[in-house]
Amino acid sequence: MGRILRNTVILAKLEATYGTDAAPVGASDAMLVSNAEINPLNAQNVNRDLIRGYLGGSDQLVGTAYLEVSFEVELAGSGTATTPTQWGRLLQACGFAQTIQTASVDYTPVSTFGASSALTIYYYLDGQLHKLLGARGTFSLGMGVGERPLLRFRFIGKNGGLTAATNAVPTLTAFRTPLVVTDANTGDITLGALTYTTATGVLSGGTAFTSRGLNLDLANNVVFQPLLGGETVEITNREPTGAISLDLTAAQAVTAMTDVLANTTTGLGITHGTTAGNIIVLHMPNVQRVEPTVENLNGNAFHRYNLRILPSSGNDELRIVTR
């Protein structure tokens, strides 16, 4: 009898000591996901290439190896403005610091990685348990109009073993139902001089534009380091990018092209959600628009720009806020 892919349970818990099994449990560490996939053994096999006096292939030896998982998590708050979401720990393993503010929880990028910067991930596949240790990763974010807002994660981790085990029973009540990206649920994209107030978690200023939503890719460079005496997964760089498509007047399109040609950067922000505890704020203070194109949306001309999301003074190119 075949095993069923939908009988998948994913648990994730931050490690106090890198690479040491944090032993996640279903009651507190379960993830509500979609489109989950696993590569159970990404190995650099070594070919023996033997010469034996006749033709034919040689066996390969399993060399350095790691595991890889990917899944989507809906972008929604915890229900309480200053309570971290379950997916907040996933951001921390993608190179973000979590800070609980007066009225929000803020996530900002870091460039050094200490305690609580990697995950133990248990991936139960209908009675089969794959363990990833020291897992770090990257993500993309999709907030297209008419769609669920999603974080799409990809993690790699050290091989913590494979066993036959009954699926953990997941408790998923910490996850809130997301709001679809619509005009009623989502504010306009704003460009220009923006101010983020940490005391309130509110983004203000700038000029509002009608848009088709926002897409981002954190683009962490995540590498497996197979060293003798200590295998690790490292984040060695990030180069975030994105894309927006705006409804511009002729004058606004001319101004935007002038900015593109002059390599002018701008702030960019968006707020999604209407009720405290389930509001998401994205703020990028230093964005360069590149590669402009014109899109046809039901006969209307929309102006699309790819984005380069740049740091200003360092570790400040992207702020993700729940409040």
Image (tube, grey):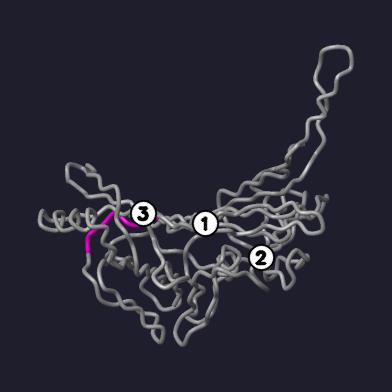
Q: Kindly identify which numbered label has been placed on residue 118.
A: 2
Question: Which residue type carries mark 1?
Answer: Phe
Discs 3/1, front: 1
In reply to whether residue 251 is colored magenta, the answer given is: no
Compare marks 2 and 1 and give the one earlier in the sequence: 2
Which secondary structure dominates the residues rendered in magenta?
Answer: strand
Q: Is residue 194 above or below residue 166?
A: below
**Side of 94 where 49 appears, left or right:** right
Measuring from the top left, give residue 133's x and y in whole percent. 73, 59
Question: Which residue type carries mark 3?
Answer: Gly
Decide: few, some or many residues near mark 3? Use Cα within 10 Å; few <14, some 14-19, many ≥20. some
Q: According to the image, label 3 marks what residue? A: 144
In depth, the one of 237 and 95 nearer the eye is 237
Which corner quadrant of the image does residue 21 belong to? bottom right
Q: Residue furthest top?
A: 54
**Side of 53 where 266 appears, left or right:** left
Measuring from the top left, give residue 18's x and y in whole percent. 73, 67
Q: According to the image, label 1 marks what residue? A: 139
Q: Is residue 125 above or below residue 105?
A: above
Residue drawn at 81 percent across, 52 percent down: 161
Residue drawn at 49 percent across, 78 percent down: 105
Question: Which residue type carries mark 2?
Answer: Ala
Measuring from the top left, give residue 160's x and y in whole percent. 78, 55
Discs 3/2, front: 2
Bounds of the magenta segment: 209-215
Q: Is residue 64 above or below residue 196?
A: above
